[in-house]
Image (cartoon, rainbow, N blue to C red):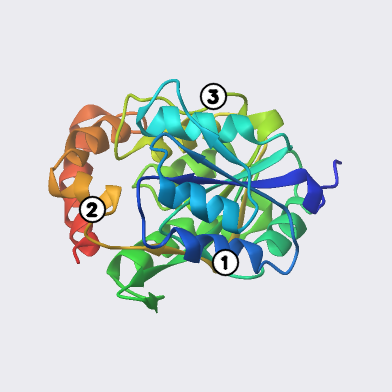
Amino acid sequence: MVKYDAPQHTYVLCAYKQSEFLEDCIKSLLAQTVKSNILIATSTPCEHISNIAQKYNLPLYINDGIKGIGGDWNFAYSKAQTPLITIAHQDDIYEPTYTEEMLEFLNKAKNPILYFSFYAELRNGEKVYKNKLLKIKKLLLSPLKIKAFWGSRFIRRRVLSLGCPICCPAVSFVKERVGENPFTNDYLSDIDWQQWEIQSRKKGSFVYNPKPLMCHRIHGESATTEIIGDSKRTKEDFDMFKKFWPEWIAKIIAKAYQSSEKSNDI
């Protein structure tokens, strides 16, 4: 069994335009109890991002290739030269023990594919641990609290069949098992759910830590809020449910699932 340590892990921070929250994210990564690698990637280079990278002496990579969410994430992912990769989003923050616990959990797992913790929301600067959406996601993920189920393709596909309870920035990828360029530009909203579905078919473990070790910021300018506001998610959700259910059942579940989007309202 491979044993991982901090030098084998990289946070790849995806920066976009002039986010007022970028520096908070970096500070949370620098405050980890176990230090690993940090780099910044962007497809929208600007003085704001360059100055912050220089201030904290972090490598900055500019994506001049394929753009879009999938292209940007693949570019960032490709710049990490380590076996373990966490794609950090500029608006979010990490609790100080995220890296420490990620390594601890992965080193307990057999053939890990992904590690992920649960998460909280950041609303108006306050951490929110309980609301309707978080309760539903915690319930969906509850089977994976049992270590014996980490390696069960059946269990993790059932977990994913009723929605996407895994928060993308809370995920660390085992590159050897996930592979190169894992993301596509087919989806805008469900690009992460699409990836979890692909990985769920593989032999190996989805390693789940039920502690909320990452805080996902909800605000009016976030990509998720914009996508939901434009109702772009509805078709993608239906497409995803069809990967797990007959079309007529997928249609019913997708309709019920739409109500959960209201939890992202500001």
**Which disc is residue 28 wearing?**
1
Which residue type carries mark 2?
Thr
Name above or below for residue 73 compared with residue 122: above
Residue at the spot x=47%, y=44% of the render?
14
Residue that lies at the very extreme toward the top in this rendered image: 65
Crowding near the residue tagged with mark 3, few <14, some 14–19, many ≥20 C-alpha atoms within 10 Å: some
Density class for disc 1 (Cα within 10 Å; few <14, some 14-19, many ≥20) is some
Question: How far from the left and from the top, in percent, is residue 126?
Answer: 37, 79
Would you place residue 167 above or below residue 198 in this image? below
Q: Is residue 168 visible?
A: no
Question: Which element type, helix, strand or loop, lies under badge 1?
Answer: helix
Q: Which residue does the image show at 44% across and 32% down from the upper left?
A: 72
Residue bearing mark 2:
225
Residue 124 placed where, x, y %? Answer: 30, 75
**Viewer-closest of 88 and 26:** 26
Instruction: Please state which amino acid type lies under the numbered disc 3.
Output: Asn
Which of the two discs, 2 and 1, labels the residue nearer the N terminus?
1
Placement of the C terminus among the 4 image quadrants: bottom left
Q: Relative to 16, is 266 on the left or the right?
A: left
Image quadrant where one finds the N terminus: top right
Name the residue beneath numbered marker 3.
181
Residue 193 sits in quarter: top left
Q: Camera-side residue: 230 or 15?
A: 15
Does label 2 or label 3 sit earlier along the sequence? 3
Q: Position of residue 219 (x, y in %)?
A: 27, 62
Point out the frontmost of discs 2 and 1. Answer: 1
Neighbour tally class for label 2: few under 14, some 14-19, many 20 plus, Cα within 10 Å: some
Of circles 3 and 1, the one toward us is 1
